[in-house]
Amino acid sequence: LQAIVSAILLLPAVATAEIPFDAAKLGHMRGVLDQCSMVSPQKASAYLLEMKTLIGSATKSMVDEATMTDEYQQSYSSVRSELGELSGEALTTACLNYLQTPP
């Protein structure tokens, strides 16, 4: 019984260990993409390119799995909240600065 409980507790760690990128970073980038794309829709492709670079050759199921993690969801929520507190001009500036910052 203890072996079964241990296996169940380890399952999420084993499943997410196969994701070839940082789920928290993906959540952060997706939060920036969503928030900044509303302010500067013409720059959305630049944010998507950054996400594609992070994701690399990961499959859709790997990305979907990453979006279900606590790390992704907390990071996504946090960055959306922080950016949502900025005024329109400050948000536009923050978004442009994000694109100009090396990874």
Image (cartoon, rainbow, N blue to C red):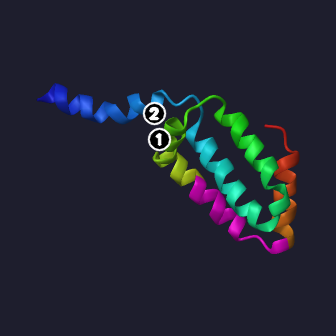
In this picture, residue 23 sits left or right of residue 55: left
What's the CA distance linking mark 2 and mark 1? Answer: 7 Å
Secondary element at image label 2:
helix
**Residue 30: image location, x then y, percent:** 65, 51
The stretch of residues the image draws in magenta is 76-88
Near mark 2 (Cα within 10 A), the count class, few <14, some 14-19 or many ≥20, is: some
Near mark 1 (Cα within 10 A), the count class, few <14, some 14-19 or many ≥20, is: some
Q: Are marks 2 and 1 in contact (CB under 8 Å)?
A: yes
Q: What main secondary structure does the magenta stretch of the protein show?
A: helix
User: Which mark sits nearer the N-terminus, 2 or 1?
Assistant: 2
What is the residue that sits farthest to the left in this orientation? 1
Q: Which mark is residue 50?
A: none
The residue sitting at 32% across, 31% down in the picture is: 10
The residue sitting at 24% across, 30% down in the picture is: 6
Judging by the rendered image, the residue that carries numbered circle 1 is 65
**Residue 66: image location, x then y, percent:** 51, 41
Q: Is residue 55 above or below residue 85?
A: above
Q: Is residue 21 above or below residue 97?
A: above
Secondary element at image label 1:
helix
In this picture, residue 46 sits left or right of residue 77: right
Magenta stretch: residue 41 in it?
Answer: no
- The quarter of the picture where residue 85 lies is bottom right
In this picture, residue 40 sits left or right of residue 2: right
- The quarter of the picture where residue 8 lies is top left
Q: Amino acid at mark 1?
A: Glu
Judging by the rendered image, the residue that carries numbered circle 2 is 16
Q: Amino acid at mark 2?
A: Thr
